[in-house]
Amino acid sequence: MKDPLLARRAMVEEQIAARGIKDQRVLNAFLEVPRHRFVEEYLKYKAYDDYPLSIGYGQTISQPYMVAIMTEALAPKPMDRILEIGTGSGYQAAVLSRLCSTVYSLERISTLASRARKVHDELGYFNIHIRVGDGTLGLPQEAPYDGIIVTAGAPHVPGALIEQLRDEGRLLIPVGDQSIQDLKRYTKTGEGVREESLGGCRFVKLIGKNGWSD
Ligand code: SAH
């Protein structure tokens, strides 16, 4: 692999900034987090390329640009507490941990959860708390959240996730069928919940009580 810092700079300039991600805090987080640490050894040379990569168990680490779109759309602020559903490699959680105060992340596959936890510990990202469980139920014991980000494709929006948002909180979630989804942003307001569509995307299945069956 070439120098990871150079690879990271190229990734940020060519794949993320060039496509319109402007938030400097977000760009800095992508420069900081060593993405190659979140993929297996045999894929490290591809870690900064412009596509998703396998992380085993039929799951993937998302394309860098998709992580950037979701991060910018979630708009995490320094004091925010964020919940992620679908830890996977732990990369998205790592990026968020640079931008907010606390990240909770839920993963249903315990091996992936422990692998991600180990990388976060090695990198000193101590404000990330990974739990094993069904994210379609959210994580009520730590609610409410300023933002919730779902990194797997859902057939519909699990009600628990809207409930666990605080006022002005944002929920980002890909909703659709198993091959293509629409990235949705729901914002809780005094009057109700505002829905926006941010474009097409393709994620692995959200599996759980209020998601797809296994
Ligand atoms: N955010 C990840 C990529 C996620 S891939 C990253 O940065 O690497 C989607 C992940 O969601 C998979 O690891 C999958 O096991 C997990 N997942 C699917 N359904 C889930 C559920 N109901 N609860 C928690 N995790 C779930």
Image (cartoon, rainbow, N blue to C red):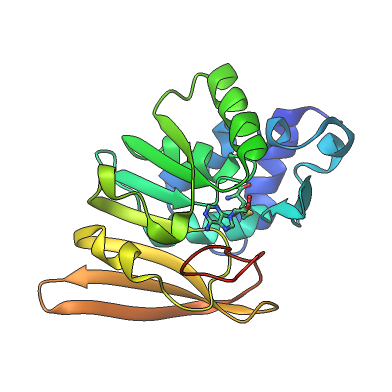
**Quadrant assignment, res 32:** top right
Is 175 placed above or below 161 here?
A: below
Tell me if I can see residue 69 in this picture: yes
| 184 to the left or right of 119 | left
Q: How many marks?
A: 0
Say which residue appears at 63% left-offset and 45% top-offset: 109
**Residue 188 in the image, given as x and y percentages of width and height:** 22, 69
- Viewer-closest of 66 and 12: 66
Q: Which quadrant would residue 158 be assigned to in this image?
A: bottom left
Residue 202 position within the rendered picture, expressed as x and y whole percent measured from the top left = 66, 71
Kindly tell me whether residue 49 is visible in this rendering. Answer: no
Q: Residue 200's x, y, as percent?
A: 59, 78
The residue lying at 19 percent from left, 62 percent from top is: 168
Residue 9 falls in image quadrant? top right
The quarter of the rendered structure image containing the N terminus is: top right
In the depicted structure, whether residue 179 falls above or below residue 60: below
Q: Residue at x 47, y 36 (%)?
A: 130
Percent from the top left, x then y, of residue 86? 55, 51
- Tell me: 152 left or right of 158: right
